[in-house]
Image: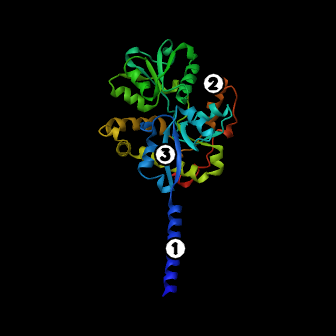
Amino acid sequence: MCKSLQRLAQTSVIALGLGLALTAQAAPTKVTYLLPAPPNSPAFAPWIIAKEKGYYRARDLDLTFIAAKGGVDVAKQIGAGNAMLGGAIGDTPIVVRANGIPVRAVAVLGAGGVTMIATNAGENIRSIKDLKGKTLTVMSYSDTTYYALLASLRKAGLSKTDVDIQAAGPSGVWQLFSASKAQAMAGVPDWVVNAEEAGLKISLIPQNEIFESMAQAILASDEAIQNQPLVVGGVVQATLEGMRDIIEDPKAAAATFAKAVPAYAGKEAALEKTLRLYVEHVYANQTVLGRIDPARLDAVRTFYVSEGIVAKEPKLDELYSNQFIETTTAAQ
């Protein structure tokens, strides 16, 4: 009898051990993902939707989003080892690699640029050149949309001293503009819709006058790419699923986002309008979702160097990696 009890106890201990091992194995990997602004922005809908719909969890990942102070700050924090991954505009590695920060883009969400320049329609600003002497708002002086604005000014023969550029934060950037305390704003599509919803009649500077910077990108450190490829690849593929949902059905995507961010409950119509701007101007015409076009990145790099926005030309192959993109899932 004692031997039977002993065997039962041993069996229980083994079963408990196996159960604990399976539980430990099933626990998702915790990942800190830095965003250039607070995560409740529609700009980050692919990420928020991917988390809400369980796309990260399906890849055994548990993402926590933390806001940094612009895309350049995201890259600096990743380079310092404070996070493996983060979001910024695809231009960002050009800026930070020149300073020795070891990060690169591993996906870009769209073939278009994310930066738009909106103006107060009453000011009759028709072109970049018409911005001379005007006040513009940006989110921060360390966000890549700021660099895209500088590049757009230089493209039109202007410099930052020809305009008054005010860093106003992720809310102030459109609030000051909609309150007519600035004649123009450089930012992402959601801020354009915010300004319109606040009652301002706006005009958009033609996209062909705006520097062809890149869309939002997923950035990773060289160390993460080398040592944590499953984590990096999982984040990339899950986020692209969220992006695909938006492209296929902006209305449904708006409902999902509003569910994840209750502050948008009842504002689904405006949210859908914002997402459609992304689909039309940013996500459109990307043959393989997420794939980085080396030729376009090279053109952006050349412009940044030639115009003195960065002092040193980084190597092109150090700015990006498509190793997590060229898969059957991404190409569907």
Question: Mark 1 or mark 3: which comes first in sequence?
Answer: 1
User: Which quarter of the picture shows residue 308?
Assistant: top right
Mark 1 neighbour class, 10 Å CA radius: few under 14, some 14 to 19, many 20 or more = few
Residue annotated with mark 3: 64
Q: Residue flagged by tag 2: what amino acid is it?
A: Ile
Q: What residue do we see at 38% from left, 17% from top?
A: 180
**How many discs appear?**
3
Quick check: marks 2 and 1 in contact, CB under 8 Å?
no
Residue at the front extreme of this rendering: 2
Residue at 68%, 25% (x, y): give it. 311
Q: Are marks 1 and 3 in contact (CB under 8 Å)?
A: no
Q: Which mark is residue 87?
A: none
Q: Going from the N terminus, do you reach mark 2 or mark 3 first?
A: 3
Q: Quadrant of residue 89?
A: top right
Question: How many angstroms separate mark 2 from mark 3 (CA)?
Answer: 33 Å
Query: Could you say where residue 210 lies in the image, as x and y percent from the top left?
Result: 52, 25
Which residue ends up furthest to the bottom in the rendered image?
1
Residue 325: image location, x then y, percent: 57, 48
Residue count near mark 3 (Cα–Cα under 10 Å), binned few <14, some 14–19, many ≥20: few
Looking at the image, the residue that sits furthest to the left is 266
Mark 2, residue position:
309
For marks 1 and 3, give the one nearer the viewer: 1
Residue 6 is left or right of residue 248, and the answer is right
Task: Report helix, strand or loop for mark 1.
Answer: helix
Query: Hey, what amino acid is under mark 1?
Result: Val
The spot of residue 36 in percent (x, y) is 51, 35
Residue nearest the observer in this picture, 223 or 303: 223
Q: Position of residue 239 (x, y in %)?
A: 49, 47
Tag 1 residue = 13
